[in-house]
Amino acid sequence: MAQIREIKKRMIAVRTIQRITKTMQMIATAKFTASLARAKASRPYMERIRELVAEVAARAGDESHPLCLAPAKPAGKELILVIASDRGLCGAYNGHVLRTSLIALKGVKSRNAQSVVETIGKKATAFFKFQKIAVEQKHQFGDRPTFEMVEPLAERLMSEYLAGQYDACRIVYMKFVSNSKQVPETMQLLPMRVPAAAAKSEGKSDGKSGEALYEFSPNAGELLNDLLPRAVKISLFQAIIDAIVSENVMRMIAMKAATDNASGIAKSLHRSYNRARQGRITTELTEIISGAAALE
């Protein structure tokens, strides 16, 4: 009798957990759909800005910009911005990002530089506190960050880099590739790397290769002064949006797996309950028959 009661309690607990995980899966699905739409909307703009930077930089001759150049006097410091989640229950999302951040910090140490850590998300802050690694600043943008919310952070990073406080600024985040593929990545935000396409197009402005000839108005330096800060801002914003999309899709997958596991456990418990109930009935019948036989 005690075993049957215990199994029934476990069945009730498992069904409750199944309802909770199913609800969380539905919420994560809705958030994923919304965040994916925002990511798809901003990605073409980011790609086009980076293409323009590549085209201008490739044909600008001796023109350059401080955001693309290493500091003249190395500061011996590099900034690592780690983007994690505020909540758990999203599978291996935070684990992958935080392990990648530790690799990035080791890379800074191997270059004989000092690392300065900033975080986005409570999980990253808690992790570095546990690791006894100081966090310079903590940022929170929520589930629906806007460009206006991220822009001040990007401007601050650029101003500090131009002031020579850091030799480089890198972002550790989960890059969204597809619904089934998310990759932890360390992206160098500053100094900004000109896309590889620009290097290939250098020396092809003579008209023989079919490439268009450019005349800059205003000059290339002024164009870079406008385009490069925009590229840095949208790159940071896109990294944050990609991280949110990846978090939601991984939470959706994790909650679906949890719901399926709860369903399997519920079926197993139901079979155990039926066997225990059947055994109890058989025992009671045996006792009744034995008692009746003893009275004869």
Image (cartoon, rainbow, N blue to C red):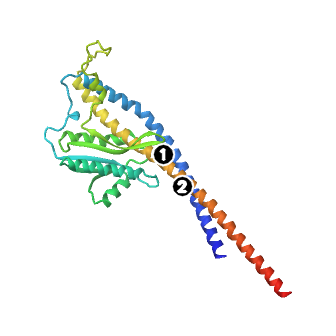
Q: Residues within 10 Å of mark 1 (few under 14, many from 20)?
A: many
Q: Nearer the viewer, residue 140 or 39?
A: 39
**Location of residue 189 with respect to 268 vertically, above or below:** above
Residue with the mark numbered 1: 249
First along the sequence among labels 2 and 1 = 1
Residue type at mark 1 is Val
Image coordinates of residue 240 in percent, x first then y, are: 38, 43
Q: Quadrant of residue 42?
A: top left
Measuring 19% from the left and 45% from the top, which residue is drawn there? 165
Measuring 77% from the left and 78% from the top, which residue is drawn there? 286
Measuring 32% from the left and 37% from the top, which residue is drawn there? 233
**Location of residue 70 with respect to 2 vertically, above or below:** above
Q: Quadrant of residue 168?
A: top left
Question: Circle 1 — which element?
Answer: helix
Q: Nearer the viewer, residue 100 or 66?
A: 100
Image coordinates of residue 154 in percent, x first then y, are: 30, 40
Residue with the mark numbered 2: 258
Question: Circle 2 — which element?
Answer: helix
**Location of residue 275 with respect to 296 vertically, above or below:** above
